[in-house]
Image (spheres, rainbow, N blue to C red):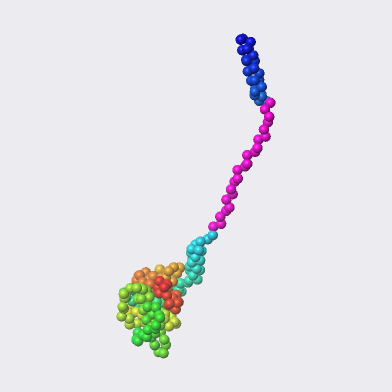
Amino acid sequence: MFAEAEQRVAAVAEAEAKNALLPIKELPEQALEPEPAPEIEVAEPQVQQAEPELETQVEQQALVQESASEWQNIETDNEFQVLFFEVAGVTFGVPLTNLGGIHRITEVSPLFGKPAWFSGIMIEREQKLSVVDTAKWVMPGQPFEPSYKYLVMLGETPWGLSCEKLLGTERLNKEDVKWRSQPGKRPWLAGMVKQKMCALLHVEELQAMLSNGVDIEGR
């Protein structure tokens, strides 16, 4: 009986010996496969294109700067005379050196297709004078119906500003005027007469606006 038990133990020991694990140093080496390098996505630089609106603004600013550089204010002596006249309660002044004359308003013939501020044509000594409704030019959209009596002519041009009252002439010094150095949105304005707080007209710029068919707002 003991002999049989010993035989079983010996058989188990022999089986375990056959299935025993190899020592670590005897394990076959396995080649390690290198891990693939992670792919790095390189973002392509985005070229920003100038927006049309930005380009338009830049062009407009360039035009404004160009016009501002070309604009020159009127030249006067240290002392000069100014004619003052009134339209719808507003006083304006024009240097006598830029005054083309004064006429009484007679018959004015309207022309089709002209702006609302263009009253029409008046014949004076066989000359055709272009009559401006000054109130409508200066204050478009306002319900003024002045009773015009006189036509103040702008230099040697056929353009004339209608007015209600002639306030006479005065001699001014340059220091009496707050002169403008840039045209801004009112190139027709040479400056402000300080004592009267009224506009001194830039006749050359004003007649250019009238010839282009635009009012005080540039429309």
Q: Nearer the viewer, residue 124 or 10?
A: 10
- Residue at 40% x, 68% y is 178
The spot of residue 71 in percent (x, y) is 48, 71
Per the image, is 34 magenta?
yes
Q: Quadrant of residue 7?
A: top right
The magenta stretch is 26-48
Residue 168, can we see it? no
Q: Nearer the viewer, residue 194 or 104?
A: 104
- Residue at 40% x, 73% y is 216
- Residue at 39% x, 78% y is 115
Residue lying farthest bottom? 126
Give the main secondary structure, helix, strand or loop, of the magenta stretch. Answer: loop
Q: Is residue 119 above or below residue 139?
A: below
Q: Is residue 12 above or below residue 217?
A: above
Locate the C terminus by quadrant. bottom left
Residue 141, can we see it? yes
- Residue at 58% x, 52% y is 44
Per the image, is 201 magenta?
no
The spot of residue 42 in percent (x, y) is 59, 49
The spot of residue 104 in percent (x, y) is 35, 85
Q: Nearer the viewer, residue 113 or 37?
A: 37
Q: Nearer the viewer, residue 124 or 21?
A: 21
The spot of residue 85 in percent (x, y) is 35, 77
Q: Quadrant of residue 19?
A: top right
Locate the N terminus by quadrant. top right
Number of on-image labels: 0
Q: Is residue 77 left or right of residue 134?
A: right
Q: Is residue 38 left or right of residue 170?
A: right
